[in-house]
Each structure stands twice: as structure tokens, then as C-alpha cells.
Image (tube, rainbow, N blue to C red):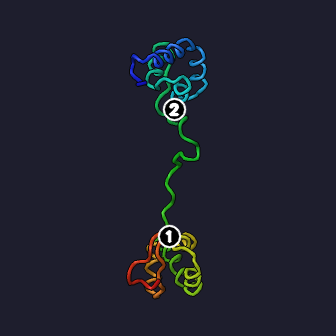
Amino acid sequence: MTNTPDSPSREAAQAAARADSDAIIRRYQAREPVSRIAADYHVTANWLGLRLIEWGVPRRHRHEAHALRRPAGHVFRGRTRRRSTAEVRAAQAQFTGDQANVTARYLAGTSITSLAREYQVSPVWVTERLDDWNVPRRPAPGRPPTPGSDT
């Protein structure tokens, strides 16, 4: 069966939603998103939004509706502070000063990304240092070794 406006199931769902308007209004005023209410009644959010206007319910502003949809942990709280050049150079110096340990850990299986995160340097910079130190590179996980590589 198709979901055309003439479809009996669509009309039945819309009739059920109209009949239950008081419950829909209560749920909406209790801060429940229109999309969730509409899904429960098997109607579109657009159709239900138009019915809320028709029933005289004041609609929420977009920013309020948006805040309801997004979990609090994902709300942007501001930029992180950029490190100064001196801080970056200090992190790089610590990495290069620990060359033997870094090389041994990389050869034992620690990823470039993990090393970069631990020493607070970029993975590209770590890769360049390993190349400078002539450390044989491993293929990325899930990739076959490239022809002519040491592995």
C-alpha cells in the first residue's frame, strides 16, 4: 500500500491524532519533540506541527526545539586554547628525547596515533620523526603492505 494522502491508513492515523488532540498538546507542552509525538501517531512531523498551530498551541522557537534534540554532551561550549609555539616545541623535545622508548614501543605494536596523543604532538610529525630515525613503518591496520616496504 502506498502512503498517498488518499490512503485509508493515513486518514485513519490523522483522524486518531485529531481525536487525541488533548494528549498531543499535553505531550508537546511537556517539552516532548514533535517528531517523537508524530512517530507515535504514524503521522508526519510537518502535519502535526500544522495541527498544533490550528489548535492554537504556541510553538517553540527553533533554538528551543534544537536544544531538546541534542544531548547535553554534544553542545559546543567554546574553543579549546591553542598551545603556544614554546609548548609545542617542548612536547616535540620530550618526544625526541625519548627516542629509544618511542622506537621500542612503536616496534612492539603501539600505534602512531597513540604515541602522538600521549606526547601531544601530531601523528604526521611522529611519522616524520620515525622516518628520520629509519624505523621501519608498519602498514596501517587493515591495509596490505605496500610493494617494496620493509614489512
- Nearest the viewer among 6 and 47 is 6
Q: At which x and y percent is residue 87?
A: 51, 72
At x 57%, y 19%, the residue is 24
User: Quick check: 148 left or right of 103?
Assistant: left
CA distance for labels 1 and 2: 43 Å
In the displayed structure, 38 sits above or below 107; it is above
- Nearest the viewer among 77 and 47 is 47
Farthest residue, direction front: 1
Q: At which x and y percent is residue 27?
A: 60, 22
In the displayed structure, 67 sits above or below 41; it is below
Residue density around tag 2, few if under 14, some if 14–19, many if 20 or more, within 10 Å: few
Which residue type does callout 1 highlight? Pro
Question: Residue beneath label 2, please?
Answer: 64
Tell me which label, 1 or 2, sits earlier in the chain. 2
Per the image, label 2 sits on a secondary structure element best described as helix
- Total number of numbered discs in the rendering: 2
Q: At which x and y percent is residue 56?
A: 49, 13
Q: Quadrant of the N terminus?
A: top left
Per the image, label 1 sits on a secondary structure element best described as loop
Question: Residue beneath label 1, please?
Answer: 141
At x 57%, y 14%, the residue is 20
- Nearest the viewer among 110 and 75 is 110
Which residue type does callout 2 highlight? Glu
Q: At which x and y percent is residue 41?
A: 54, 22
